Image (tube, rainbow, N blue to C red):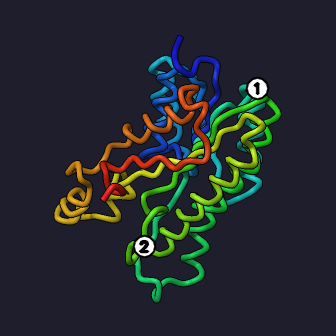
Amino acid sequence: MSRFDGKVALVTGGTSGIGKATALAFGAAGASVVVSGRREKEGAAVVDEITKAGGMAVFVRADVSREEDVKSLVERTVARFGRLDVAFNNAGVEFVGPLAEFNAEDYRRVFDINVLGVFLSLKYELPVMAKAGGGAVINTSSIAGHIGTANVGIYMASKHAVEGITKVAALEYAKQGVRVNAVAPGGIQTDMVDRFAAGEEEKKYLAGLHPVGRIGRPEEVAAAVLYLASDEAKFTTGISLPVDGGFLAQ
């Protein structure tokens, strides 16, 4: 049997980067995968890749900053597959710039997706899992949720918030068999990192910040997510697992 045979995994922000890699990994491990995001073409391509490899997957368009979208996403997942065992709340956006130059619109855009999106996802995922007797939720945080760095204040504040809500949810649902953890990636080769470090010199600098001497691959974060979602981590809840090439050890 495969690791997640008979399980249903929901991945938000699943159309690219870490979300896509994780959706593919869940599909390869036997789970039925609900891929969600705002980009239908990219979502359909991820579903196609999973199904061509012999897996089961569907795409459900949703904007995690909209409560009605998240509610419908969870309801449609349960209606289609009859259950929800794992949720990877991964949708997120970045913001770069000094604090004195950001405005309320910038703040709302980042927090509506990075924080409100996680809160709404938890609001609808957790009761479904608890009613079924258990489950696992993994939220995407960041090394930015553990440190302070200039010029990424809004993004960094949003990831500190994700760290906090992860711990609260873990405590509230521990006795109901639902584990809630986070992953905290360092620099990972994604579109988001390309926007942070557009040129080769910037990428070289970013790689040098990691003791291993390189930035990570989305598949390496996916492996950590699958571990936290698996029975191998059944005594693990309320943590934030760095996948950062040693960055936070410095």
Q: Is residue 165 left or right of residue 247?
A: right
Looking at the rendered structure, the secondary structure element under dot 2 is loop
Q: Is residue 12 visible in this depiction of the protein?
A: no
Instruction: Name the amino acid type tagged 2.
Output: Val
x then y, percent, for residue 122:
70, 49
In the displayed orientation, state which residue is furthest to the top.
Answer: 1
User: For residue 40, which numbered disc appears in the image?
Assistant: none
| Residue drawn at (42%, 71%) of the image | 148
Q: How many numbered marks are there?
A: 2
Image quadrant where one finds the C terminus: bottom left
Q: Is residue 62 visible in this depiction of the protein?
A: yes
Q: Residues within 10 Å of mark 1 (few under 14, many from 20)?
A: few
| Residue drawn at (48%, 35%) of the image | 46
Say which residue label 1 marks. Answer: 82
Say which residue label 2 marks. Answer: 152
x then y, percent, for residue 77:
71, 34
| Residue drawn at (66%, 62%) of the image | 116
Q: Residues within 10 Å of mark 2 (few under 14, many from 20)?
A: some
In the displayed orientation, state which residue is furthest to the right.
Answer: 131
Instruction: Name the amino acid type tagged 1.
Output: Gly
x then y, percent, for residue 53:
45, 20
Q: Is residue 84 left or right of residue 88?
A: right
Q: Is residue 15 left or right of residue 204?
A: right
- Residue contact at pointers 2 and 1, CB within 8 angstroms: no
Residue situated in front as seen by the camera: 177 or 55 = 177
Q: Is residue 178 left or right of residue 183?
A: right
Looking at the rendered structure, the secondary structure element under dot 1 is loop
- Mark 2 vs mark 1: give the one in front: 2
User: Which mark sits nearer the N-terminus, 2 or 1?
Assistant: 1
User: Does 26 sit above or below residue 62?
Assistant: above
Q: CA distance from mark 2 to mark 1?
A: 41 Å
x then y, percent, for residue 172:
75, 48
